[in-house]
Amino acid sequence: MAALVSVADVAELWGAQWQREGSGGRLTLPVTAGLRRGRVSGALSAAPHGCGLKLQFEPRESEYHLVWPAVAFLVLASAGGLFSMVWPFFAHRRPELLEAAPLAFFLAVGGWLLVVSRLRNSGPEEFLEEVAGRLTPSDGGE
């Protein structure tokens, strides 16, 4: 089955562990979900479907952890954003707050540019899309 050969190739590119068993196998896949990273393990099966094959992944185990440096920077950036919004209400009593306003603004924008704009998701769906992209209709792809 060319589909399972493509699964093995894509698994190697992704750094996944693939163990073929009959018309399917066991897949342990590294995943990214926003601020979380981890692994998802489960059974991958290939079944005839129309003129081709249907790959189906059934997750059995998942393990996620937070990326703490990014979370810490977002907390700092949110403090900067909050200060940027609130300081005008206190500027008449404490004019020295004006000096910290540019720093607070750059912290808030920096949080967006360094963390939020770079958040990605990659998991079983993206993995299977990449496998399908490598298949031609004669291989069992659509």
Image (cartoon, helix red, strand yellow):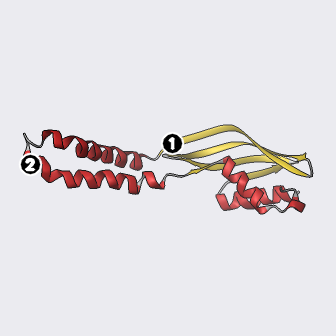
Q: Amino acid at mark 2?
A: Glu
Name the residue rendered at 60%, 48% in the picture.
Answer: 31
Q: Nearer the viewer, residue 108 or 74?
A: 108
As drawn, is 53 to the left or to the right of 66?
A: right
As drawn, is 19 to the left or to the right of 125?
A: right
Residue 19 location in percent, x, y? 77, 51
Residue 83 location in percent, x, y? 23, 43
Q: Residues within 10 Å of mark 1 (few under 14, many from 20)?
A: few
Q: Element under label 1? A: strand
Residue 108 location in percent, x, y? 31, 50
Residue 62 location in percent, x, y? 62, 39
Name which quarter of the figure residue 136 lies in. bottom right
As drawn, is 139 to the left or to the right of 9?
A: right
- Viewer-nearest of discs 2 and 1: 2
Name which quarter of the figure residue 56 lies in. top right
Q: Element under label 2? A: helix
Q: Residues within 10 Å of mark 2 (few under 14, many from 20)?
A: few
- Does 51 appear above or below 79? below
Name the residue rendered at 32%, 48% in the picture.
Answer: 77
- On-image quarter of the C terminus: bottom right
- On-image quarter of the N terminus: bottom right
Q: Which mark is residue 53?
A: none
Q: Nearer the viewer, residue 68 or 137?
A: 137
Q: Which mark is residue 65?
A: 1
Residue wearing tag 2: 96
Q: Residue furthest top?
A: 60
Name the residue rendered at 66%, 49% in the picture.
Answer: 29
Q: CA distance from mark 2 to mark 1?
A: 41 Å
Q: Nearer the viewer, residue 109 or 5?
A: 109
- Does 105 appear above or below 43? below
- Does 78 appear above or below 52? above
